[in-house]
Image: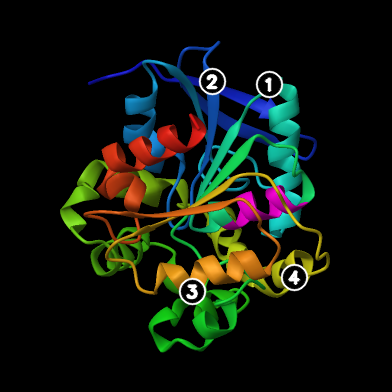
Amino acid sequence: MSIELRHTFLDTGDGALHVVEAGDPHGRPYLFLHGWPESWQAWRDVMTLAAPDARAIAIDLPGVGRSAATGDRGVKRLLAARVHELIRSLDLTDVTLVGHDAGGMVAYAYLRRYPRIARVVIMNTAIPGVEPWTEVLKNPYIWHFGLHNVPTLPETLVQGHQAEYFGYFYDVLSADPSKIGPESRAAHAAAYDSDTSLTAGFDLYRAFAQDAHDNTASAVAIRTPLLYLRGRREQGDIATYESGFRAAGIENLTTAVVPGAGHFAPEEAPAEVWRLIREFAGR
């Protein structure tokens, strides 16, 4: 099924964000944040499913794809402020903020700073400073966290080889790598084709220490509804993540597993992802 995609650019103070919309402009809004190494197009299939009765909005994170690079340096607190400005500029109410991977880290930073948002969905990610974060950092399976934190080196190694490097993660972390097809892979690689965009992506990792500090600076309880999703084939026990969120003060938490998916659930199982998000928002 094809849908009309509306592309605009919105200035959020330090550069324009590439904003893509689908569906009813007056419908309930869902704002989607992608992870690494992806772009807004990670949400295309979910947006297609949402479009008949919702306002589906996705962005390229600052510096990625067609969004301008900024001085945020990957710090999720600052990226959350840009998302907040976007929500204000679009005059969105009753928003469901959905973040996958690094986008989920931005969504958590948003939740801590702007808890009056209606609801938040976080998918397939660990949150800096929130357990099991310390165990994730020790896991040799997550070797790329260390590499991506090194200044300039990953840019040097990956430039010109984006498709091959990103493809490794799609193949290893997906339950069925074929679900992330050639068109999607090419679009994501193109979103990081410049040195600037590569740096924007790797800066998401370089900011982890600051993110952990920011996320633990306040122990205020959060009552905003939060849905945490993980693909069934994703590493880690979802109950451990649930305990971490509750210990961090998240009081209204729901968790669910996405069948047939690994790490890249929005592309691997878009119908199930949208079903879970829609049901959560409808409660």
Task: Specify the quadrant of the image occupied by residue 120.
Answer: top right
Earlier-in-chain disc, 4 versus 2: 2
Residue carrying label 4: 210
Residue type indicated by callout 3: Thr
Which of discs 1 and 2 lies nearer the camera? The answer is 2
Which of discs 4 and 3 lies nearer the camera? The answer is 3
Residue carrying label 2: 28
Q: For mark 4, does the 10 Å Cα neighbourhood hold few (<14), some (14 to 19), or many (20 or more) residues?
A: some
Where does the magenta region start and end?
Answer: 105-112
Secondary structure category for the residue under label 3: helix
As measured in the structure, the alpha-carbon distance from the residue carrying label 4 to the one carrying label 2 is: 33 Å
As measured in the structure, the alpha-carbon distance from the residue carrying label 4 to the one carrying label 1 is: 29 Å
Residue carrying label 3: 240
As measured in the structure, the alpha-carbon distance from the residue carrying label 1 to the one carrying label 3 is: 36 Å
Quarter the N terminus occupies: top left
Asked if residue 72 shows in the view, the reply is no
Image location (x, y in percent) of residue 258: 31, 53
As measured in the structure, the alpha-carbon distance from the residue carrying label 1 to the one carrying label 2 is: 13 Å
Q: Residue at x 18, y 58 (%)?
A: 176
Residue type indicated by callout 2: Arg
Image location (x, y in percent) of residue 143: 44, 82
Residue carrying label 1: 90
Q: Is residue 66 magenta?
A: no
Which of discs 1 and 3 lies nearer the camera? The answer is 3
